[in-house]
């Protein structure tokens, strides 16, 4: 039986396939903001470059802000180095108050005498709040002035009337306290070597609640010879801190209120008839109390000397032993002297 004619025609018809065009690669071009050989030389990945990405997402503004912040920060640090105003040095240095100190008597010769900071040059104006540091070197314990206090430094009266800094003129004085003891009649502070030993006596004139003048003191014992020593004082209304080589050595609670005449706001070093044998230099003054941390940052020495004791010739104030007056005048001084200084 043969197939129907219609089926035969379908089976014998030639195959007809759809015509398909050949696939061509897609080419894509990028503008200058996209990756080029300038971004990565020799490499063309066909991806957007870093600058294009930053522009697309606002990243360039972040870069500009970081650069501006860096420039501003560097400018602030430079300005602060010349005109301190930051509360703390950004590199861990002293505070703005400590960096605002004023230094005198730089690089003095070993025999420089009658060093003076005049009242209109001194940054210290108040009798009860100030800070100071000074470098001293004791050359010899022997001195023609044995029996009298040997002058290192003081702020106060000028019994010899010396007005020219560095003058070699000794000058004279009719002040009985100075001629007998070697002490000016007003000191705030006064630093003197002991009459016979290498003990540093620190004197502060104060006035009691009853109006009596007191000469309070303490001593730094047995200073070494031929070694540079940094002595620092910080007066904070009621408390005097004493630093030796920038380390806290003693704290003294005033028995009275520190006093200083307005006309005596001048500093003297190795003064007049009885200077100590040695050198004095780099007196730095502040008009405010600086902290212990700032004091330690102002120098590098770390050697600590012995504990403090009352100084002969001075009134021992409260604070060393914890309460009030612990003694009268020592070393043969009369009560009349302490009441009239």
Image (cartoon, rainbow, N blue to C red):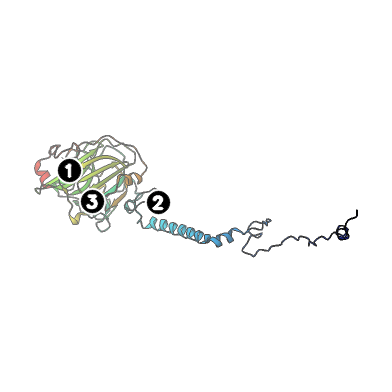
Mark 1 falls on what kind of element? strand
Please give the label number shown on residue 129. 3
Image coordinates for residue 317, horizontal then vertical, percent: 16, 41
Nearer-the-camera pick, 8 or 41: 8
Other residues around mark 3 within 10 Å, as few (<14) / some (14–19) / many (≥20): many
Where is mark 1, residue-wise? 216
Image coordinates for residue 62, horizontal then vertical, percent: 50, 59
Measure the C-alpha gap from mark 3 to mark 2: 27 Å
Image depth: mark 3 or mark 2 in front: 2
Nearer-the-camera pick, 245 or 314: 245
Taking the spot 42% from the left edge, 57% from the top edge, the residue there is 78
Image coordinates for residue 24, horizontal then vertical, percent: 76, 61
Nearer-the-camera pick, 84 or 27: 27
Task: Choose top left, top right, bottom left or bottom right for residue 100.
Answer: bottom left
Taking the spot 74% from the left edge, 60% from the top edge, the residue there is 25
Nearer-the-camera pick, 178 or 85: 85
Q: Earlier in the sequence, mark 3 or mark 1?
A: 3
Mark 3 falls on what kind of element? strand
Q: Is residue 204 left or right of residue 28?
A: left
Task: Choose top left, top right, bottom left or bottom right for residue 314.
Answer: top left
Discs 3, 1 touching: Cβ within 8 Å: no
Mark 2 falls on what kind of element? loop
The correct choice, above or below, for 205 with respect to 19 in the image is: above
Q: Is residue 96 left or right of residue 259?
A: right
Q: Is residue 184 visible?
A: yes
Taking the spot 28% from the left edge, 52% from the top edge, the residue there is 286
Please give the label number shown on residue 90. 2
Measure the C-alpha gap from mark 3 to mark 1: 16 Å
The correct choice, above or below, for 210 with respect to 328 in the image is: below
Measure the C-alpha gap from mark 1 to mark 2: 39 Å
Q: Earlier in the sequence, mark 1 or mark 2?
A: 2
Task: Choose top left, top right, bottom left or bottom right for residue 51.
Answer: bottom right
């Amino acid at each position: 039986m043969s197939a129907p004619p219609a089926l035969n025609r379908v089976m014998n018809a030639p195959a007809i396939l759809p015509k398909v065009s050949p696939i061509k690669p897609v080419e894509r071009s990028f503008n200058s903001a996209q990756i080029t050989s300038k971004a990565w030389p020799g490499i063309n990945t066909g991806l957007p470059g870093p600058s294009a990405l930053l522009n697309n997402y606002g990243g360039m503004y972040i870069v500009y802000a970081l650069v501006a912040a860096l420039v501003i920060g560097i400018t602030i640090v430079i300005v602060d180095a010349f005109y301190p105003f930051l509360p703390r040095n950004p590199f861990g240095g002293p505070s703005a108050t400590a960096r605002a100190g004023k230094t005198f008597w730089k690089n003095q010769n070993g025999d420089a005498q009658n060093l003076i900071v005049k009242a209109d040059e001194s940054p210290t104006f108040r009798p009860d709040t100030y800070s100071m540091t000074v470098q001293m070197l004791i050359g010899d314990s022997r001195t023609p002035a044995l029996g009298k206090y040997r002058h290192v430094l003081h702020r106060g009266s000028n019994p010899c009337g010396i007005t020219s800094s560095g003058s070699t003129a000794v000058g004279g004085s009719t002040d009985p306290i100075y001629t007998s003891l070697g002490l000016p009649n007003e000191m705030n502070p006064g630093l003197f070597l002991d009459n016979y030993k290498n003990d540093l006596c620190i004197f502060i004139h104060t006035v009691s609640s009853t109006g009596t003048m007191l000469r309070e003191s303490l001593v730094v014992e047995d200073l070494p010879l031929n070694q540079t020593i940094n002595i620092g004082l910080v007066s904070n209304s009621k408390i005097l801190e004493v630093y030796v080589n920038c380390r806290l050595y003693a704290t003294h609670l005033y028995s009275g209120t520190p006093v200083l005449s307005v006309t005596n706001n001048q500093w003297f070093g190795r003064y007049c008839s009885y200077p100590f044998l040695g050198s004095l230099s780099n007196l730095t003054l502040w008009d405010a109390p600086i902290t212990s941390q700032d004091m330690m940052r102002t120098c590098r020495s770390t050697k600590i000397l012995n504990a403090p004791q009352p100084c002969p010739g001075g009134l021992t104030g409260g604070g060393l032993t914890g309460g009030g007056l612990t003694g009268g005048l020592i070393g043969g001084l009369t009560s009349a002297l302490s009441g009239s200084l």
